[in-house]
């Protein structure tokens, strides 16, 4: 992934940890899980607003 997207996505996951600690840790602890999560987030963003 390019640009600041990976870091911003990681920040969003960290911010959500208050409510979803178990799920957040699963995403952050495993690079493959993070990449899969990022792909889903990108796809959703593209569907909502066009290009990312």
Image (cartoon, rainbow, N blue to C red):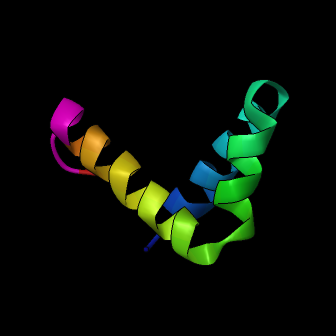
Which residue corresponds to the image point at 61% horizontal and 75% vertical from the top-left?
31
Residue 21 in the magenta stretch? The answer is no
Looking at the rendering, which quadrant does residue 13 occupy? Answer: top right
Instruction: Return the x and y of residue 16 as percentages of the image width and height.
Output: 72, 32
Q: Residue at x 43, y 74 (%)?
A: 1
Q: List x then y, in percent, for residue 15.
A: 76, 35
The quadrant where residue 21 appears:
top right
Q: Does 6 sit left or right of 21 as displayed?
A: left
Question: Residue 7 or 18: which is nearer the viewer?
Answer: 18
Number of marks: 0
Residue that protrudes farthest toward the top in the picture: 19
The residue stretch that appears in magenta: 47-51
Q: Is residue 31 shown to the viewer in this render?
A: yes
Q: Residue at x 50, y 58 (%)?
A: 5
Establish if 4 lies above or below 21: below
- When the figure is inspected, residue 18 is found, relative to residue 26, above or below; the finding is above
User: Does the magenta-highlighted stretch encompass residue 48?
Assistant: yes
37 vs 48, left or right, is right
Above or below, 2 against 19 in this view is below
Give percent across and percent down for residue 24: 71, 46
Name the spot of residue 8 as percent of width and height, x first.
Answer: 61, 51
Residue occupying the point 84% across, 28% down: 18
Prevailing SS of the magenta stretch:
helix
Is residue 4 shown to the viewer in this render?
Answer: no
């Amino acid at each position: 992934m390019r640009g600041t997207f990976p870091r911003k996505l990681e920040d969003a996951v960290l911010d959500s940890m208050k409510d979803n600690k178990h799920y957040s840790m699963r995403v952050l602890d495993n690079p493959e899980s993070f990449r899969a999560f990022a792909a889903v987030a990108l796809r959703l963003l593209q569907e909502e607003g066009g290009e990312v």
